[in-house]
Image (tube, coloured by chain):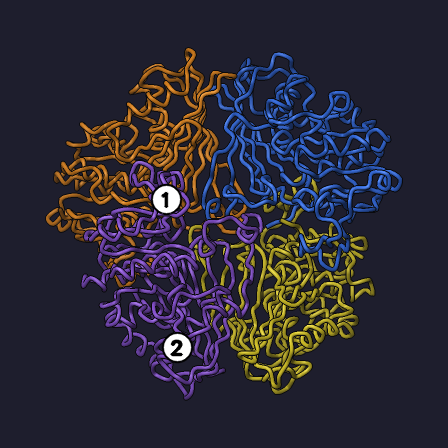
Chain colours: A yellow, B purple, C orange, D blue
Amino acid sequence: MNVAIIGPTGYVGIELLRLLYKHPHVNIHSIHSSSKVDTPLHEYFPHVHGMLSLQLEEIDVEKIAKACDVVFFATPSGIAKELALPFIDKGIRIIDLSGDFRLQEEGMYEQWYKNQPAPMSYVQQAVYGLSEWNKENIRDANVLSNPGCYATAALLGLAPLLVHGVIEEDSIVIDAKSGVSGAGKSPTMMTHFPETNENIKIYRMNEHQHIPEIEQQLAKWNKNVAPITFSTHLLPVTRGIMATMYGKVKKEESIERLINLYKECYQDCSFVRIQEKGIYPSIKQVYGSNCCDIGIAYDERTSRVTIVSVIDNVMKGAAGQAVQNFNIMYGLDERTGLDFLPIFP
Amino acid sequence: MNVAIIGPTGYVGIELLRLLYKHPHVNIHSIHSSSKVDTPLHEYFPHVHGMLSLQLEEIDVEKIAKACDVVFFATPSGIAKELALPFIDKGIRIIDLSGDFRLQEEGMYEQWYKNQPAPMSYVQQAVYGLSEWNKENIRDANVLSNPGCYATAALLGLAPLLVHGVIEEDSIVIDAKSGVSGAGKSPTMMTHFPETNENIKIYRMNEHQHIPEIEQQLAKWNKNVAPITFSTHLLPVTRGIMATMYGKVKKEESIERLINLYKECYQDCSFVRIQEKGIYPSIKQVYGSNCCDIGIAYDERTSRVTIVSVIDNVMKGAAGQAVQNFNIMYGLDERTGLDFLPIFP
Amino acid sequence: MNVAIIGPTGYVGIELLRLLYKHPHVNIHSIHSSSKVDTPLHEYFPHVHGMLSLQLEEIDVEKIAKACDVVFFATPSGIAKELALPFIDKGIRIIDLSGDFRLQEEGMYEQWYKNQPAPMSYVQQAVYGLSEWNKENIRDANVLSNPGCYATAALLGLAPLLVHGVIEEDSIVIDAKSGVSGAGKSPTMMTHFPETNENIKIYRMNEHQHIPEIEQQLAKWNKNVAPITFSTHLLPVTRGIMATMYGKVKKEESIERLINLYKECYQDCSFVRIQEKGIYPSIKQVYGSNCCDIGIAYDERTSRVTIVSVIDNVMKGAAGQAVQNFNIMYGLDERTGLDFLPIFP
Amino acid sequence: MNVAIIGPTGYVGIELLRLLYKHPHVNIHSIHSSSKVDTPLHEYFPHVHGMLSLQLEEIDVEKIAKACDVVFFATPSGIAKELALPFIDKGIRIIDLSGDFRLQEEGMYEQWYKNQPAPMSYVQQAVYGLSEWNKENIRDANVLSNPGCYATAALLGLAPLLVHGVIEEDSIVIDAKSGVSGAGKSPTMMTHFPETNENIKIYRMNEHQHIPEIEQQLAKWNKNVAPITFSTHLLPVTRGIMATMYGKVKKEESIERLINLYKECYQDCSFVRIQEKGIYPSIKQVYGSNCCDIGIAYDERTSRVTIVSVIDNVMKGAAGQAVQNFNIMYGLDERTGLDFLPIFP
């Protein structure tokens, strides 16, 4: 398969290249940028020097459409909603890693992204690529909307509880923590080393744009779900998301029953690993991999369940899941090009 | 005032020395250890070389009691419950920074610390040193039980909500994050650099020994308080605790009203700094200081309040608060020896 | 003494404020910026909230000169060379923490700073504030040129070897490592967290502007000194400089003799701490303090001496040494306002 | 090929498993430990859970020798010198990643490792596996002695200068910096997070056991080489080595000529990447890969060349080079199982 990547100079784009470079069924046909044409990629990323000798090209829809089977958008939100449209019109499959095609309800994109949305007719074609829970639809997707990093960690962790009605629908609290790569490659005060290092900061409290994305999917599983409380913390690490999530059970539970429920839900999922009783995952144990590791606690004193869900935000939270979805879209084993161990330490 | 310090070779002990070294009313009479007698302190802490030329001495109760007004215990839990008793018997004031005199209810220490408690008659003499909320009793304390680090961050953050009955008593979720210095100076797998760096880990989920300490104090403020959900995360930073806390309000609130409530509660407290609307504290902004900074959010979508409380675990979470309590006990301005700015960056 | 600070919104400026806030003989009269007038300081530095309630003012030379005894310039290089001149003309003592008054030789500033220098008549009035080696001149300085951070670490470490002719004058290699705060408060790609974290980078190889400053001072001690090899590494830490320095001895030495030489040279210097044989300083042991710790190795196999000199770049490498120089200029004990322990861990 | 790994519970062992798991010509037959028999590997490394279901077995020489083509020793120094002997006797090829078979000169192992060496008859069979410079001998090696991490970085960086007689043989200074994973998986005070974080420390100044290994190889290239000055710094990062190296040129050079020399020397080496003029490598750009990136500076002011050589200590400094050597030993393309991009950021 020939693929083109638009926006390869960000952290998600380069991770996508790392994966596709080794994917047995992919040929990286070309990489594109609207602003940085004719520069070799290694000027942005010295680590690919001598290994990936690609040059940034302009975005010529005709040319790309002719040569490629699929186009990945690794651009920030606000780009694909325009640039992807002509490809969609031509019937080229696109995989968008931004938030531009995620929110199906009118008005939500404007409210949370503070920006004009893509035309609704396009958004409605999009299939939400939460691989483990939407495989059937992903298979046939022409417009694949890859989930947000926080949304992936949160949804995979909460799904069994909501699908099976284990917790009170208005009791969900998500305390999410992310590494700094999630903020992208442009330097800001927020990501300036002396400000971030030895620190943990709160940002976008109850205002993060992944909130409506999470609620939209939760509502598909359980229509009684109430708005969630969602706080986001910036960790002094490069990669990794941990979502620590809390909910009140509807009736008395046992930790064994809960762990079994999770194991059953995810028994056919290569990348979701349920931890044993008393074991909680750390972000480093999924570093560089497409895994989502989930730990489960139940406290009889409070009747609350605590779910700890970790991913590598650049992988399962972005490029890794995009490749997983690509595999599903093309009928490949979902592990193709992703079946390596996390890197540790 | 002449003071002795027992257990100065840990991180809390050395921080206590840093503070007392500059305290205008304190003479550090002697430092003591049961195991490391006759070693100069700088063998444990090269940074004091040439500045603090103290030598570790054995613990001779008679000698210390004769020379000193107050004895600080900067020992791990399980030591002061025995070593402090003869000092108490002799009427020497003690300030214990461990958990040995914190839990007033029979059986609780055994349950949470997995150890035999101090004799209850001694425990009951102890005054809980949450400086901002117990000043009257602290003034006259002979046995001052200095609060735990997590407990300090959590209690200062929750107090106004509980004292004023703002939130449902069974709705409290505390998501706490701590720097590694909280785990002490002994190397373990948990604190081994390659395992902790670029990581965030969960430990003692719902089992941390500060839980009963927090619940005990919350119950003093509001006897209807239900057990709390409390999870503890290890951050890849040296110092700092952030407690992100969630509760459901009893009736509709506004962010302005809540912030005012906090400002009023803490208007006479030099070390508690309430953040303005939309501002949340980060741990680095209290580094090296005795401050507790508190940010408040209210989400109308969920009727939940989120409180973000940060401290330096070695300071307000241990040595700093101990000096603050010492000041109160001796009728000094509580800021004495603590009135410096946090160090930044 | 009334002091004004120009440029307090950088990392050096805020550290200066931390020190002067507690200095017993200083009143911080006002803080000034050319661009950010009328903003409260805590908008730049949340950590001073509620403690330092200063507002940025414009730079009115008349007003400042009337009210203040001394003006500190904590501005980047290129500012003081103009803004300081009217103060100098009025006979106000200035302490410049930038490189603008350091290079006495015509042409050097232009060559290394790529910028027009201050008028030579002003530069020649400046006294180089390497406190330990220039005390006599500092006492009477009207224009105090505070040394660069790398220069301080390197010069204090090399001085005894050059002054006493221990090493070959053309054998000096300086391998210097600095924390990121040295790069200032403006975010750049170089200081973007995901790029700096878990990394060590080289920058300005053999081109750092502290090279001529070091060579100028070395030449004062030993006129045969040849150009130095000087490489600068960016460490993934916030504070601290380590200079590891190498030289070939002229005749056979012993480690004992060398350590004694250093101890003698620095016997009256409160802030320079010579390590014992086999002990080498780490940057963390001087964190937040004005200390310069020096370790000495001698290898008989190679006849080379290795000197390890560490400082806190924001302290002894900038604000701390400025206060030390201020003390000397006003006949105070040089430790005034600086006599606290490093913060550890 | 069937391989066995002895010592897979350390950081080098697990990295070896990460690589061999994906190696197209390798079957991991079994993993062995002398002390931890019958434990599943994921108890030591949660990140392999559900992916690598290997169990630690005892070391039964007969059984292993029967089933395997090659045995990797990822044990600390002092183990293989005994445990490897029976395998060697049986003609099984071994690849030892420790220092046990590196020092060919009588007495050196004792002097630098403070331990009894392997019998010299075995040591002399060993081939030093500096892949780029010893390919011919590696091909036929029965006992492959994999180079030390520091030695690899230093030797690859210095080789062209020594082989071609560019620098004075007594002018070599190596300032080496390593991440903490190089210190292994056992927690110590040296590697305790609060002591290592935000720090840089010197250790084994002029005493590191890689010194004789480096000198032995340098002498093969240039018999006039004098003892080297070698200092080792512990960086607050998990992975990565940077060796900054200094030498005085014999006659006037130009940077262009030097870079060309390096490019020629390494033109057929997939893993060595020579940087262009003015570009210096950082450790992060080789993270997780088998690359060694080399930058070259020449300073006309001092006639000194500065070489910056970076590797991932766990990869090219250990497991990666071992796999590269394995490939050479079995006539495979040296990139087999290693041809992936570094992971960034």
Secondary structure under tag 2 reads helix
- Return the residue nearer the eye: A48 or B207: B207
Q: Which residue corresponds to mark 1?
A: C287
Kindly identify which numbered label has been placed on residue B218.
Answer: 2
Q: Residue A35 appears in which quarter of the rendering? A: bottom right
The location of residue A256, given as percent across then percent down, is 68, 74
Amino acid marked by disc 2: Leu
Question: Is C124 on the left or on the right of C108, as rendered?
Answer: left
Residue C178 located left or right of residue D322: left
Q: Decide: is D266 above or below A231.
A: above
Q: Residues within 10 Å of mark 1 (few under 14, many from 20)?
A: many
Q: Position of residue C269 (x, y in %)?
A: 26, 31
Horizontal and vertical percent position of residue A112: 52, 74
Residue at the far right: name it.
Answer: D66
Rendered location of residue B10, percent (x, y): 40, 50
| In the image: residue B94, left or right of residue A85 | left
Q: Residue at x 36, y 73 (%)?
A: B277
Q: Residue at the location (31% across, 25% down)?
A: C263
Q: Which quarter of the picture shows residue D157?
A: top right
